[in-house]
Image (cartoon, grey):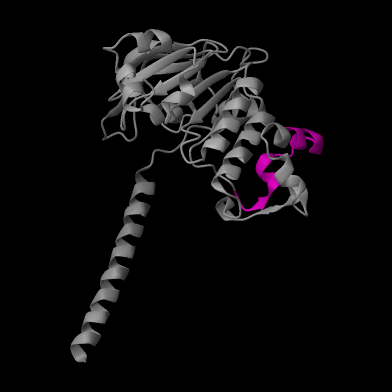
Protein backbone atom coordinates (compact mmCIF):
# COMPACT_ATOMS: atom_id res chain seq x y z
CA UNK A 1 0.00 0.00 0.00
CA UNK A 2 2.86 2.38 0.89
CA UNK A 3 4.51 1.67 -2.47
CA UNK A 4 1.31 2.59 -4.34
CA UNK A 5 1.05 5.86 -2.39
CA UNK A 6 4.69 6.70 -3.14
CA UNK A 7 4.23 5.88 -6.85
CA UNK A 8 1.11 8.05 -7.08
CA UNK A 9 2.93 10.92 -5.37
CA UNK A 10 5.91 10.52 -7.72
CA UNK A 11 3.70 10.58 -10.81
CA UNK A 12 1.90 13.69 -9.55
CA UNK A 13 5.18 15.48 -8.82
CA UNK A 14 6.61 14.58 -12.23
CA UNK A 15 3.46 15.90 -13.92
CA UNK A 16 3.66 19.19 -12.01
CA UNK A 17 7.38 19.45 -12.78
CA UNK A 18 6.77 18.97 -16.50
CA UNK A 19 4.04 21.63 -16.45
CA UNK A 20 6.32 24.08 -14.63
CA UNK A 21 9.21 23.43 -17.04
CA UNK A 22 6.93 24.22 -20.00
CA UNK A 23 5.86 27.46 -18.29
CA UNK A 24 9.48 28.47 -17.67
CA UNK A 25 10.38 27.69 -21.30
CA UNK A 26 7.51 29.88 -22.50
CA UNK A 27 8.53 32.80 -20.24
CA UNK A 28 12.11 32.41 -21.47
CA UNK A 29 10.89 32.49 -25.07
CA UNK A 30 8.94 35.71 -24.44
CA UNK A 31 11.99 37.28 -22.79
CA UNK A 32 14.06 36.53 -25.89
CA UNK A 33 11.49 37.95 -28.29
CA UNK A 34 12.68 41.03 -30.12
CA UNK A 35 10.55 44.07 -29.32
CA UNK A 36 8.24 45.04 -32.17
CA UNK A 37 8.82 48.19 -34.16
CA UNK A 38 6.87 51.38 -33.45
CA UNK A 39 3.10 51.14 -33.83
CA UNK A 40 2.98 54.52 -35.57
CA UNK A 41 5.61 56.54 -37.44
CA UNK A 42 5.57 60.03 -38.91
CA UNK A 43 5.80 58.93 -42.55
CA UNK A 44 4.32 60.81 -45.50
CA UNK A 45 2.68 58.22 -47.74
CA UNK A 46 1.45 58.77 -51.31
CA UNK A 47 -2.24 59.64 -51.54
CA UNK A 48 -4.53 56.60 -51.40
CA UNK A 49 -1.61 54.27 -50.68
CA UNK A 50 -1.72 51.44 -51.58
CA UNK A 51 -3.67 52.13 -54.77
CA UNK A 52 -2.34 49.25 -56.89
CA UNK A 53 -1.42 46.39 -54.56
CA UNK A 54 1.94 45.58 -56.15
CA UNK A 55 4.29 43.57 -53.92
CA UNK A 56 8.04 43.21 -54.47
CA UNK A 57 10.54 41.10 -52.55
CA UNK A 58 14.02 42.54 -53.21
CA UNK A 59 17.00 40.39 -52.15
CA UNK A 60 14.84 39.47 -49.16
CA UNK A 61 16.03 37.13 -46.40
CA UNK A 62 14.57 36.56 -42.95
CA UNK A 63 14.77 34.33 -39.89
CA UNK A 64 12.58 33.77 -36.83
CA UNK A 65 15.24 34.68 -34.28
CA UNK A 66 18.75 36.06 -34.47
CA UNK A 67 20.41 32.74 -33.66
CA UNK A 68 18.34 30.62 -36.07
CA UNK A 69 18.83 29.76 -39.75
CA UNK A 70 17.29 31.80 -42.54
CA UNK A 71 13.79 30.65 -43.52
CA UNK A 72 13.64 32.86 -46.64
CA UNK A 73 16.86 33.27 -48.62
CA UNK A 74 17.64 36.01 -51.16
CA UNK A 75 14.12 36.12 -52.55
CA UNK A 76 13.56 38.31 -55.61
CA UNK A 77 10.02 38.21 -56.94
CA UNK A 78 7.31 40.66 -58.06
CA UNK A 79 3.59 40.15 -57.48
CA UNK A 80 1.99 42.50 -59.99
CA UNK A 81 -1.12 44.51 -59.22
CA UNK A 82 -4.41 42.55 -59.26
CA UNK A 83 -2.66 39.26 -59.94
CA UNK A 84 -3.62 36.01 -58.26
CA UNK A 85 -0.46 34.42 -56.91
CA UNK A 86 -0.25 30.86 -55.62
CA UNK A 87 2.63 29.84 -53.35
CA UNK A 88 3.46 26.15 -52.95
CA UNK A 89 6.20 23.95 -51.58
CA UNK A 90 6.72 20.99 -49.35
CA UNK A 91 6.65 21.25 -45.54
CA UNK A 92 9.32 23.68 -44.34
CA UNK A 93 9.69 25.34 -47.74
CA UNK A 94 9.01 28.81 -46.30
CA UNK A 95 5.44 29.36 -47.50
CA UNK A 96 3.97 30.67 -44.25
CA UNK A 97 7.12 32.71 -43.62
CA UNK A 98 6.06 34.84 -46.61
CA UNK A 99 2.87 35.72 -44.71
CA UNK A 100 4.75 36.56 -41.51
CA UNK A 101 7.15 38.73 -43.49
CA UNK A 102 4.36 40.69 -45.20
CA UNK A 103 2.74 41.54 -41.86
CA UNK A 104 6.16 42.15 -40.27
CA UNK A 105 5.70 39.51 -37.62
CA UNK A 106 9.27 38.69 -38.56
CA UNK A 107 11.69 41.36 -39.76
CA UNK A 108 14.19 41.20 -42.64
CA UNK A 109 17.70 39.93 -42.07
CA UNK A 110 18.54 41.61 -45.38
CA UNK A 111 16.72 43.07 -48.36
CA UNK A 112 13.26 44.61 -48.31
CA UNK A 113 9.59 44.22 -49.20
CA UNK A 114 7.93 46.99 -51.21
CA UNK A 115 4.19 47.58 -51.45
CA UNK A 116 3.47 50.06 -54.23
CA UNK A 117 7.14 51.10 -54.08
CA UNK A 118 7.06 51.82 -50.33
CA UNK A 119 9.49 49.89 -48.09
CA UNK A 120 7.22 48.43 -45.42
CA UNK A 121 9.92 48.70 -42.71
CA UNK A 122 9.58 52.49 -43.02
CA UNK A 123 5.95 52.24 -41.88
CA UNK A 124 4.54 51.96 -38.40
CA UNK A 125 2.88 48.61 -37.80
CA UNK A 126 -0.52 50.29 -37.44
CA UNK A 127 -0.14 51.93 -40.86
CA UNK A 128 0.76 48.62 -42.46
CA UNK A 129 -1.74 46.29 -40.80
CA UNK A 130 -4.75 48.49 -40.09
CA UNK A 131 -4.84 52.18 -40.91
CA UNK A 132 -4.25 52.13 -44.67
CA UNK A 133 -6.17 48.92 -45.43
CA UNK A 134 -3.06 47.55 -47.14
CA UNK A 135 -3.33 43.93 -46.03
CA UNK A 136 -5.99 41.44 -45.01
CA UNK A 137 -5.53 37.79 -44.13
CA UNK A 138 -7.71 34.71 -43.93
CA UNK A 139 -5.54 32.36 -41.85
CA UNK A 140 -5.54 28.59 -41.58
CA UNK A 141 -6.56 28.84 -37.93
CA UNK A 142 -9.21 31.58 -37.76
CA UNK A 143 -8.84 33.92 -34.78
CA UNK A 144 -12.00 34.99 -32.94
CA UNK A 145 -12.33 36.61 -29.54
CA UNK A 146 -14.86 36.59 -26.74
CA UNK A 147 -17.47 39.20 -27.65
CA UNK A 148 -20.25 39.74 -30.15
CA UNK A 149 -20.13 38.62 -33.76
CA UNK A 150 -20.33 42.27 -34.78
CA UNK A 151 -17.35 43.21 -32.61
CA UNK A 152 -15.32 40.35 -34.08
CA UNK A 153 -16.07 41.69 -37.55
CA UNK A 154 -15.63 45.38 -36.73
CA UNK A 155 -13.65 45.89 -33.49
CA UNK A 156 -13.08 49.61 -34.19
CA UNK A 157 -16.74 50.33 -35.07
CA UNK A 158 -15.89 51.63 -38.54
CA UNK A 159 -18.81 50.12 -40.48
CA UNK A 160 -22.61 50.33 -40.46
CA UNK A 161 -24.87 47.39 -39.68
CA UNK A 162 -25.88 47.36 -43.35
CA UNK A 163 -22.25 46.92 -44.38
CA UNK A 164 -21.83 44.17 -41.79
CA UNK A 165 -24.87 42.27 -43.08
CA UNK A 166 -23.70 42.72 -46.68
CA UNK A 167 -20.31 41.19 -45.86
CA UNK A 168 -22.03 38.27 -44.11
CA UNK A 169 -24.21 37.74 -47.17
CA UNK A 170 -21.20 37.69 -49.48
CA UNK A 171 -19.48 35.28 -47.09
CA UNK A 172 -22.53 32.96 -47.22
CA UNK A 173 -23.22 33.41 -43.50
CA UNK A 174 -26.40 35.50 -43.72
CA UNK A 175 -28.80 32.54 -43.39
CA UNK A 176 -26.95 31.31 -40.30
CA UNK A 177 -26.96 34.77 -38.67
CA UNK A 178 -30.66 35.35 -39.42
CA UNK A 179 -31.48 32.23 -37.40
CA UNK A 180 -29.62 33.54 -34.35
CA UNK A 181 -31.93 35.22 -31.78
CA UNK A 182 -29.47 38.11 -31.32
CA UNK A 183 -28.29 38.32 -34.94
CA UNK A 184 -24.96 40.09 -35.29
CA UNK A 185 -24.96 40.69 -31.52
CA UNK A 186 -24.65 36.93 -31.00
CA UNK A 187 -22.07 36.19 -28.29
CA UNK A 188 -18.93 34.44 -29.52
CA UNK A 189 -17.15 32.28 -26.95
CA UNK A 190 -13.38 32.25 -26.50
CA UNK A 191 -11.67 31.17 -29.71
CA UNK A 192 -15.06 30.95 -31.42
CA UNK A 193 -15.70 27.54 -29.89
CA UNK A 194 -19.48 27.89 -30.31
CA UNK A 195 -18.98 28.07 -34.09
CA UNK A 196 -17.83 25.31 -36.41
CA UNK A 197 -14.40 25.53 -38.06
CA UNK A 198 -16.09 26.35 -41.36
CA UNK A 199 -18.19 29.11 -39.80
CA UNK A 200 -15.14 30.64 -38.12
CA UNK A 201 -13.36 30.66 -41.46
CA UNK A 202 -16.34 32.36 -43.12
CA UNK A 203 -16.36 35.01 -40.36
CA UNK A 204 -12.73 35.76 -41.25
CA UNK A 205 -13.79 35.97 -44.90
CA UNK A 206 -16.54 38.46 -43.98
CA UNK A 207 -13.98 40.50 -42.03
CA UNK A 208 -11.73 40.66 -45.10
CA UNK A 209 -14.71 41.66 -47.27
CA UNK A 210 -15.41 44.57 -44.93
CA UNK A 211 -11.84 45.80 -44.93
CA UNK A 212 -11.50 45.84 -48.75
CA UNK A 213 -7.71 45.75 -48.68
CA UNK A 214 -5.64 45.96 -51.85
CA UNK A 215 -3.75 42.79 -50.88
CA UNK A 216 -5.44 39.64 -49.59
CA UNK A 217 -3.39 36.81 -48.10
CA UNK A 218 -4.87 33.34 -47.71
CA UNK A 219 -2.53 31.26 -45.56
CA UNK A 220 -3.79 27.71 -46.24
CA UNK A 221 -7.19 29.17 -45.43
CA UNK A 222 -9.19 26.14 -46.56
CA UNK A 223 -6.92 23.42 -45.18
CA UNK A 224 -9.19 22.69 -42.19
CA UNK A 225 -12.62 23.11 -43.78
CA UNK A 226 -14.84 20.72 -45.70
CA UNK A 227 -15.14 20.71 -49.47
CA UNK A 228 -18.42 22.66 -49.49
CA UNK A 229 -16.97 25.51 -47.39
CA UNK A 230 -13.84 25.47 -49.53
CA UNK A 231 -15.99 25.94 -52.64
CA UNK A 232 -17.88 28.86 -51.04
CA UNK A 233 -14.64 30.62 -50.09
CA UNK A 234 -13.07 30.10 -53.52
CA UNK A 235 -16.20 31.36 -55.29
CA UNK A 236 -16.33 34.52 -53.17
CA UNK A 237 -12.63 35.21 -53.64
CA UNK A 238 -12.95 34.95 -57.42
CA UNK A 239 -15.86 37.41 -57.57
CA UNK A 240 -15.38 39.83 -54.67
CA UNK A 241 -11.59 40.20 -54.61
CA UNK A 242 -11.02 40.63 -58.34
CA UNK A 243 -9.82 44.21 -57.75
CA UNK A 244 -7.07 43.28 -55.33
CA UNK A 245 -3.86 41.28 -55.39
CA UNK A 246 -4.46 37.81 -53.96
CA UNK A 247 -1.66 35.73 -52.46
CA UNK A 248 -2.64 32.15 -51.65
CA UNK A 249 -0.44 29.86 -49.56
CA UNK A 250 -1.68 26.58 -50.99
CA UNK A 251 -2.48 23.36 -49.17
CA UNK A 252 -4.66 21.98 -51.93
CA UNK A 253 -3.01 22.35 -55.34
CA UNK A 254 -6.37 22.51 -57.11
CA UNK A 255 -7.21 25.82 -55.36
CA UNK A 256 -4.42 27.69 -57.18
CA UNK A 257 -4.61 26.20 -60.68
CA UNK A 258 -6.42 29.33 -61.91
CA UNK A 259 -3.69 31.62 -60.52
CA UNK A 260 -1.87 34.04 -62.79
CA UNK A 261 1.46 32.82 -61.46
CA UNK A 262 2.77 30.10 -59.16
CA UNK A 263 5.75 30.61 -56.84
CA UNK A 264 7.41 27.33 -55.88
CA UNK A 265 9.62 27.46 -52.80
CA UNK A 266 12.09 24.92 -51.46
CA UNK A 267 14.06 25.43 -48.25
CA UNK A 268 13.37 29.16 -48.37
CA UNK A 269 14.52 29.65 -51.96
CA UNK A 270 12.60 30.47 -55.13
CA UNK A 271 12.68 27.42 -57.38
CA UNK A 272 10.06 28.33 -59.98
CA UNK A 273 7.87 31.33 -60.76
CA UNK A 274 5.67 31.00 -63.80
CA UNK A 275 2.07 30.59 -64.88
CA UNK A 276 0.57 27.19 -63.93
CA UNK A 277 0.03 26.02 -67.52
CA UNK A 278 3.71 26.40 -68.34
CA UNK A 279 4.78 24.63 -65.16
CA UNK A 280 2.38 21.73 -65.74
CA UNK A 281 3.66 21.27 -69.28
CA UNK A 282 7.20 20.94 -67.96
CA UNK A 283 7.44 17.39 -66.63
CA UNK A 284 10.73 18.29 -64.93
CA UNK A 285 9.24 21.14 -62.90
CA UNK A 286 8.73 20.78 -59.17
CA UNK A 287 5.17 22.07 -59.52
CA UNK A 288 4.45 19.23 -61.97
CA UNK A 289 5.78 16.79 -59.35
CA UNK A 290 3.61 18.33 -56.61
CA UNK A 291 0.52 18.24 -58.83
CA UNK A 292 1.15 14.62 -59.73
CA UNK A 293 1.57 13.69 -56.05
CA UNK A 294 -1.80 15.36 -55.36
CA UNK A 295 -3.42 13.31 -58.17
CA UNK A 296 -4.18 16.47 -60.14
CA UNK A 297 -2.60 14.95 -63.26
Please say whether residue 150 is one of the residues in the magenta stretch.
yes
Q: Is residue 18 visible?
A: yes
In front of the other: 192 or 121: 192
Task: Give the percent coordinates (x, y) of residue 90.
Answer: 31, 28
Please say whether residue 258 is one of the residues in the magenta stretch.
no
Above or below, 89 against 29 in this view is: above
Task: Give the percent coordinates (x, y) of residue 213.
Answer: 62, 24
Above or below, 167 against 2 in this view is: above
Residue appearing at x 34%, y 44% in the figure: 32
In front of the other: 238 or 54: 238
- What's the magenta region? 145-166
Residue appearing at x 47%, y 21% in the figure: 256
Q: Quadrant of the C terminus?
A: top left
Q: Is residue 203 shown left or right of residue 111?
A: right
Task: Give the percent coordinates (x, y) of residue 186.
Answer: 72, 52
Task: Give the percent coordinates (x, y) of residue 276.
Answer: 42, 13
Q: Quadrant of residue 50?
A: top right
Above or below, 189 against 174 in this view is: below
Outermost residue to the left = 3
In front of the other: 97 or 281: 281
Q: Quadrant of the N terminus?
A: bottom left
Residue appearing at x 30%, y 69% in the figure: 15
Q: Quadrant of residue 130?
A: top right
Q: Is residue 149 shown left or right of residue 38?
A: right
Above or below, 277 against 215 in this view is: above
Residue appearing at x 61%, y 19% in the figure: 214
In front of the other: 35 or 111: 111
Q: Is residue 275 visible?
A: no
Amino acid sequence: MDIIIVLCWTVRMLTELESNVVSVERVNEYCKNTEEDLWEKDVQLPANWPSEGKVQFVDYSTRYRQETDLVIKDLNVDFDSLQKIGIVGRTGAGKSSITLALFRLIEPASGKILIDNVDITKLGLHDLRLKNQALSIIPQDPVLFTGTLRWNLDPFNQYTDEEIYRSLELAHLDDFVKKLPEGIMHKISEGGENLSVGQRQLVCLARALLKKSKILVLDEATASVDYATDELIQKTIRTEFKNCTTITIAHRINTILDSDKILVLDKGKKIEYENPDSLLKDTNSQFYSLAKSANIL
